[in-house]
Amino acid sequence: MAIRPILIHPDPRLKKVCPPVEAVDDEVRRVADDMLETMYAAPGIGLAAPQVGVLRRIFVMDCNRSDAGKEPVICINPEIVATGAERVKTEEGCLSIPEVYDEVERFETLTLRFLDRDGAVVERPLTGQWSICAQHELDHLDGRLFIDYLGAVRRTMITIRMKKLKREKARG
Amino acid sequence: MTSPPPRPFLIWPDPRLRRPADPVAGVDAEVLALWDEMLRAMYAMPGVGLAAPQIGVGLRLAVIDCSTGARAPVRLANPEFVWQSEKTETHPEGSPNLPGLTAPVTRPAEIGLRFLDESGAVVERVFAGLWAASAQHQLEHLDGRLFVERLGPVKRRLLLSRHAKRQRRG
């Protein structure tokens, strides 16, 4: 396993709709394992493949905060098959938009269908932080960031801040 | 997605800012998670140091990063002075607990600290320049003191009344 660099917004690869994974093979497993390692190191609770420059429908998450590293979930070709009626507003942050947090409204519960690490079809009900995280990561696979839900002024301010951060990082 | 945002900074005169913090028993998963949260809060400011009481956690934990290039965070648990230089230096200081207000503070230019690092080992390390100023500023927070207490009475009153006025205005 290896830690891969995380792309920082703005980056064209973060705006792409990713095509599905055709077969869950060793290469896909390697990407997913690297993503988990990268996510834990960041540290984060979710990471989508385009954030490490891989334009495929894969994300990983672990929202178990009390026991970090104990509940990794790999979701390949994920789709929402059902949602509850309730929506909740929480502050979100993104590893591709460091140190920015803002409120986003999401479904509180949903059922996610995806292929696991072995390529088996899984249907899993998710609630609370797990549900919010899955929606956040699924958005990445469609080229959407959480700041796209914010007002244009706030979004522009954040983008300027990230451009500055990237310049500083490039300078080292 | 990142973990939920760090706890907000307490605003002076929150009584939790005046309470001496308790030592930690050791460096465990909870302490590591708190340091991460503190670093995220510090970089978001952006700032060069943060002590746990500033986000309402009454433990002797602090983080410092005064690097100008790549990040170089230092995590401290149960820090204590082993040495302070006679030579002094003056740096402008501020605190997210007194948003937007800064004042020059004179302190020993170099210090030696003993603390537990992220591996739980006892280390001794010398800090100089801005690193020393930030470390001393954080250690004061752990004893329930803010940098304004280092200012003369006139300057302190002026700063705190300006803060009070800003808070009333919201």
Image: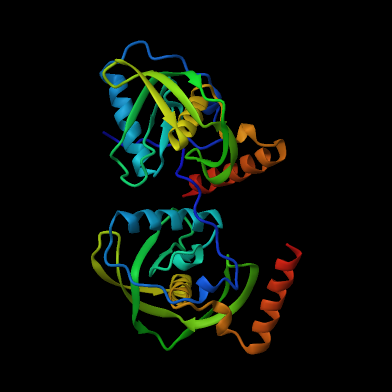
Q: Considering depth in this image, is B156 or B129 the residue closer to the camera?
A: B156
Residue at image location 41% in from the left, 39% down from the top: A45
Residue A11 horizontal/vertical position (percent): 54, 31
Residue lying at the far top of the rendered structure: A22
Q: In which image quadrant can residue B109 be found?
A: bottom left
**Which of the pair B128/B48 is nearer the observer?**
B48
Q: Is residue A158 left or right of residue A127?
A: right
The quarter in which the N terminus of chain A is drawn is: top left
Work out whether B118 lies above or below A118. below
Q: To which quarter of the image does residue A36 belong?
A: top left
Q: Is residue B77 above or below residue B42?
A: below
Q: Position of residue A98 (x, y in %)?
A: 51, 44
User: Farthest residue in the front direction?
Assistant: A85
Q: Give left or right: position of B163 versus B127.
A: right
Please give the name of the residue rendered at 54% of the width and 53% of the height, measured from the top-left corner: B44
Query: What colouring does the structure picture have?
Result: rainbow
To which quarter of the image does residue B11 belong? bottom right
Q: Closer to the camera, B158 or B123?
A: B158
